Image (cartoon, grey):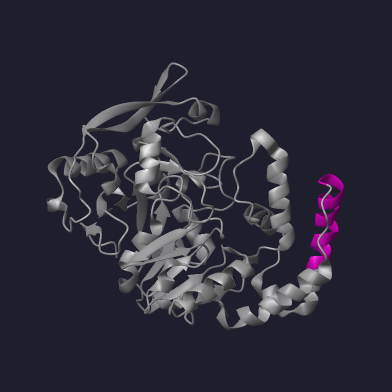
Amino acid sequence: MPAITLVGAQWGDEGKGKATDLVGNRVDYVVRYQGGNNAGHTVVIGDQKYALHLLPSGILSPDVVPVIANGVVIDPAVLFEELRGLRERGVSTERLLISANAHMIMPYHRALDKVTERFLGKGRIGTTGRGIGPTYADKISRTGIRVQDMFDPKILRQKLELALHDKNQVLTKVFNRRGVELEQVFDEYMEYAEELRPFVADTSLELNRALDEGKTVYLEGSQGTLLDIDHGTYPFVTSSSPTSGGACAGAGIGPTRIDKVVGIVKAYTTRVGSGPFPTELHDEWGDWLRQKGGEYGVTTGRNRRCGWFDAPIARYATRVNGITDFFLTKLDVLSGLERIPVCVGYQANGTRYDEIPMTQTEFHHAVPVYEYLDGWNEDISHARAFEELPKTAQAYVRTLEEMAGAPISAIGVGPGRDQTLELRSLV
């Protein structure tokens, strides 16, 4: 069987955990291929809610092998806290595999992330301060520390000495902060090594062998297309590639292995952090969407910025990722609206754009052009088939599908595991 990739089609927080949980009992592996604990998935099973920040959503499915692949950056303290929390709730974590090539978030990464963001003032990017960006920066500059380095004390100490020689200079002399103690970090991470060891594997080899054996591999990205380091609203982006192309590098499999790309898209739009957001609402409707949709970050708790559905963004995500299917989430949030605005293009500097403008300046000044679709008053959270939705809700879905350029194969009408209408199989 080929691999299936799951990507966020907006600025993240689209409900990817719900999509992964939907197919959890129909796949063999669920792989997190990029990002770190700067993202989060909420999965609701019965009356239980699980907030995952670093672990793949597939860890909640008893027959799935969850994988943290090489493209992820790992804060071991966060990882072990999540694992302990799941075990205390009766969830098995023994199947988890972690790539030996994944990079480690170190204490100096977190320190630099926080102090740099404060230093930027009004120009801040809106990072979570969890050390993600500095860890990826060290990875690219070839000074990073990988999981496998922790199993060789000599290598770990050498790499720490090299890193702290520079990092402490910056912390103490540029930002007037306390430096990081080498011995303290070394001892802490040597303890982590022993706890990590049972989970570590050559995950690229494992996944390719699984595909050769006809097993199904689900590749789960964090964040969203508009936060991609290359294809997002740079510099207000994450430090990795959440798009489908990033899945290959981040998991160690070839692009010919991927047969289906599922884009997760909300029935409206949200984002967290700074950066352009053409349909953002600064009025009572923005508050209405936030409160009714529960738009607060899983990882940070920050209020999400809210706006109406943006069709050019959805088309862009289809194009950049090669999306074959959409999973539309939170359709139920829009119940009660008489008319629903949908952004179909932009005006910027006297020019009409039907696609995302090429430059950041144009996109920053883009004013949405809206079309208005009929809404519905019915509570749709109890619908279990597309035909059970009000006609106007069905028309809203079909219009978004046409505008986005790929079929909507599943629809979320509530947070629960059973509140999903599957029009076509996502596996």
| Residue 204 visible in the current orientation | no
User: What's the magenta bit mostly, secondary-structure-wise?
Assistant: helix
Residue in view at x 66 percent, y 56 percent: 131
Tell whether 144 sits left or right of 26.
right
Image location (x, y in percent) of residue 177 = 82, 51
Image location (x, y in percent) of residue 216 = 36, 72
Q: Hey, which quadrant is residue 59 in on the image?
A: bottom left
Seen in the picture, residue 205 relative to 219 is either above or below; the reply is below
Point out the image quarter for the C terminus: bottom left
Residue in view at x 70 percent, y 38 percent: 120
Residue 170 falls inside the magenta stretch: yes
Image location (x, y in percent) of residue 349 = 47, 18
Seen in the picture, residue 95 relative to 311 is either above or below; the reply is below
Q: Hey, which quadrant is residue 285 in on the image?
A: top left
Q: Which residues are magenta?
A: 159-175
Residue in view at x 49 percent, y 72 percent: 67
Image location (x, y in percent) of residue 153 = 77, 78
Looking at this view, is 81 or 103 the one in front? 81
Residue 2 falls inside the magenta stretch: no
